[in-house]
């Protein structure tokens, strides 16, 4: 039993015989007969023993009861950077897992942006071993190319046997079309998805933020939408040529949504994700030169934000990323030009999404995106909310207002622009048997 209860005190237990009674929780699970119903749940030794619309009075080691309590199957993310091995001063497996759990996630895919990169079976085995018995299930994503350099294919098959669920070069765009084409040919033979970040750096050398009025006003080098859309178009063509599935890790422009929608309509095996902040934040946030808003892909315009949200509604975009990218203060508290890219996201993603995106797409759809779609991409079993199933649950209150504080952060790094921001929607805890 792995359990975290965030309110009012943190409790973490590995007691496999523990009994937990959850009282009066509203179920958010479209596939369950209890969807939208208020139930009591008894979890015994990590297994859902009872689910009842009537009051349960079983004796339990821990009773969870809170006004406005909601429950779903556990959330999953596929873009976590745990920086382990090599950059443990930013994050390590333990702190990353704690951050994920505090944010309501019971499973995370960890990106291969490490040193050494996760480009052979030994590094995958390292992640599997070091993440064992953590509060969240950790899925290693292997490097597509050696050292994430986009040239020589890494040991894909060996990594898959060792536990890799997908292949990616993290946030390094793959410039060599031939190399990606060969990778797509090979990955089809081992039935493992490839994830790519669409960005042609040659279009915007030195670019840091969205090309537009804000960048001009602030004197910052811009990244045009074209830099992303060229690569989206090219990679769609490569996927079509090789008859292979391809996942765009994160898109940010209206044009990308259009290209991917057309590819799907043509029957191509294309999927896409979006970083949570691109769904509500525009480049207007850069006015204060907060380096925590220096992210990849960059914050875009309101027209792009609206198109991305519409892409979620119509299922052109299937996945929302927390894009957890920890950076220590030495890499962020510097001039904007020299600051590292990225913000931490695991602890705050749900609160931001519930506040800004759920009112537009609905809470049930948001939860479905967070729970089922990442697992479908990686071929993982979707947890069941039925009696006799192993518990894999996230507890949350979508109506609770709170101010995100540094004290809420379990990550080693604190690079979030949202410290001090009030949100609606708070994670209560997770239970994983």
Image (tube, rainbow, N blue to C red):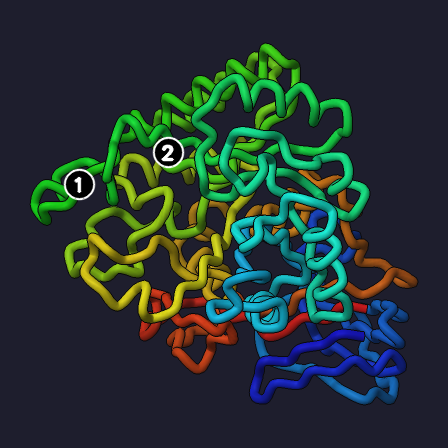
Which quadrant: the N terminus?
bottom right
Q: Quadrant of residue 417?
A: bottom left
At a point 83% along the width and 87% down the height, the residue shown is: 60
Residue position marked by numbered label 1 in the rendering: 221
Q: Earlier in the sequence, mark 2 or mark 1?
A: 1
Q: Looking at the image, is 114 positioned above or below residue 91?
A: above
Q: Is residue 50 left or right of residue 381?
A: right
Q: Which residue is painted at 9% across and 46% down in the image?
A: 219
Q: Is residue 152 left or right of residue 335?
A: right
Above or below, comparing residue 309 to residue 104 in the picture:
above
Q: Quadrant of residue 269?
A: top right
**Between 400 and 340, the one nearer to me in the picture:** 340
Q: Secondary structure at mark 1?
A: loop
Q: For the residue carrying disc 1, how many other residues have a C-alpha within 10 Å: few (<14), some (14-19), or many (20+)? A: some
User: Which dot marks residue 307?
Assistant: 2
Q: Residue at x 34, y 50 (%)?
A: 295
């Amino acid at each position: 039993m792995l359990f975290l209860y965030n309110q009012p005190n943190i409790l973490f237990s590995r007691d496999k015989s523990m009994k937990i009674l959850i009282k009066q929780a509203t179920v958010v699970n479209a596939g369950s007969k209890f969807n939208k119903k208020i139930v009591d749940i008894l979890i015994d030794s990590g297994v859902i023993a009872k689910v009842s619309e009537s009051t349960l009075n079983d004796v339990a080691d821990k009773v969870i009861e809170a006004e406005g309590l909601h429950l779903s199957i556990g959330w999953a993310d596929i873009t976590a950077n745990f920086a382990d091995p090599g950059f443990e001063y930013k994050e390590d497996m333990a702190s990353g897992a704690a951050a994920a759990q505090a944010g309501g996630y019971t499973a995370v895919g960890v990106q291969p942006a490490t040193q050494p990169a996760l480009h052979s079976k030994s590094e995958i085995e390292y992640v599997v071993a070091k993440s064992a018995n953590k509060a969240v299930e950790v899925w290693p994503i292997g490097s597509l190319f050696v050292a994430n350099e986009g040239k020589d294919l890494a040991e894909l098959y060996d990594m898959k046997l060792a536990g890799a669920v997908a292949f990616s070069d993290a946030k390094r765009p793959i410039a060599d079309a031939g190399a990606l084409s060969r990778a797509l040919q090979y990955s089809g033979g081992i039935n493992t998805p490839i994830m790519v970040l669409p960005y042609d750096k040659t279009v915007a050398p030195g670019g840091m933020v969205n090309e537009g009025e804000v960048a001009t006003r602030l004197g910052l080098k811009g990244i045009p939408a074209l830099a992303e859309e060229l690569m989206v178009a090219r990679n769609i063509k490569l996927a079509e040529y090789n008859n292979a599935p391809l996942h765009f890790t994160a898109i940010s422009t209206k044009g990308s949504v259009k290209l991917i929608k057309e590819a799907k309509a043509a029957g191509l095996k294309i999927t896409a994700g979006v970083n949570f902040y691109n769904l509500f934040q525009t480049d207007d946030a850069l006015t204060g030169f907060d380096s925590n808003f220096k992210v990849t892909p960059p914050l875009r315009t309101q027209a792009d934000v609206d198109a991305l949200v519409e892409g979620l509604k119509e299922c052109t975009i299937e996945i929302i990323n927390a894009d957890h990218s920890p950076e220590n203060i030495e890499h962020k508290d510097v001039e904007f030009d020299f600051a590292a890219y990225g913000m931490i996201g695991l602890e705050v993603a749900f609160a931001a999404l519930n506040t800004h995106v759920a009112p537009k797409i609905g809470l049930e759809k948001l939860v479905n995106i967070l729970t089922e779609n990442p697992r479908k991409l990686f071929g993982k079993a979707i947890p069941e909310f039925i009696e006799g199933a192993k518990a894999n649950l996230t507890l949350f209150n979508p109506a609770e207002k709170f101010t995100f504080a540094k004290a809420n952060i379990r990550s080693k790094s604190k690079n979030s622009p949202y410290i001090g921001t009030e949100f609606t929607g708070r994670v209560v805890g997770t239970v994983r048997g």
